[in-house]
Image (tube, grey):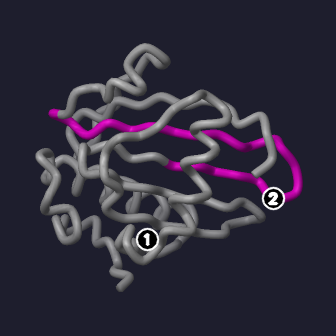
Amino acid sequence: MKHLIDFNNVSEKGLASSPVVKALAGLRANEARYFKNKYHLDFTVTPASESNDIITWVHPILKEERDIVITSKPLETARFLIENMKWVFIFYESGLAINIPYTLEDKSKRAVGFKLSEGMEIPEELATKFKFARQKSKLAGIIRGSYFVIKGDY
């Protein structure tokens, strides 16, 4: 069942099995604040068990583009269509969050973003492939992030 993410009152709902649950909840709330402020959009998430279509769309992109296989369990997903751009998110038990902005009509803005919750190690499958920049967030503490541009069509 979908639920709305409130960035004023950060909730750990749906993320309890994560060893960095507080930081992951803050990271998710940080995303919710961004979408509310930029697009006036309420950020809703769905349990991964109810949104396998998102996971089966994202994981092949990772594998085909960069030979990445995420080993952590997906907990929640989100999807939006904003200004002809598909946005998808997967929040993982490890504290990893993946987001993909994917333009539908052209290839100008297609990328995979990785964000690491404060307190988690860089996942082995990403450690040798990416450098992570740090960003401070009032909701999530220190977020480390990286990305790559998607070259194929999915």
**Which residue is tagged 1?**
43
In this rendering, would 16 be left or right of 84? Answer: left
- Where on the picture, by quarter, is residue 56? bottom right
Quarter of the image where the N terminus is located: bottom left
Do the residues under discs 1 and 2 have CB atoms within 8 angstroms?
Answer: no
Residue at disc 1, secondary structure = loop
Q: What stretch is highlighted in magenta?
A: 99-119
Residue 123 is tagged as none
**Residue 139: image location, x then y, percent:** 23, 50
**N-term mark: 1 or 2:** 1
Going by the numbered disc 2, the residue's amino acid type is: Leu
Front-most of residues 6 and 40: 6
Near mark 2 (Cα within 10 A), the count class, few <14, some 14-19 or many ≥20, is some
Which residue is located at x 81 percent, y 41 percent? 108
Which residue is located at x 71 percent, y 43 percent? 110
**Which residue is tagged 2?**
104
The outermost residue toward the bottom is: 1
Which residue is located at x 39 percent, y 63 percent? 32
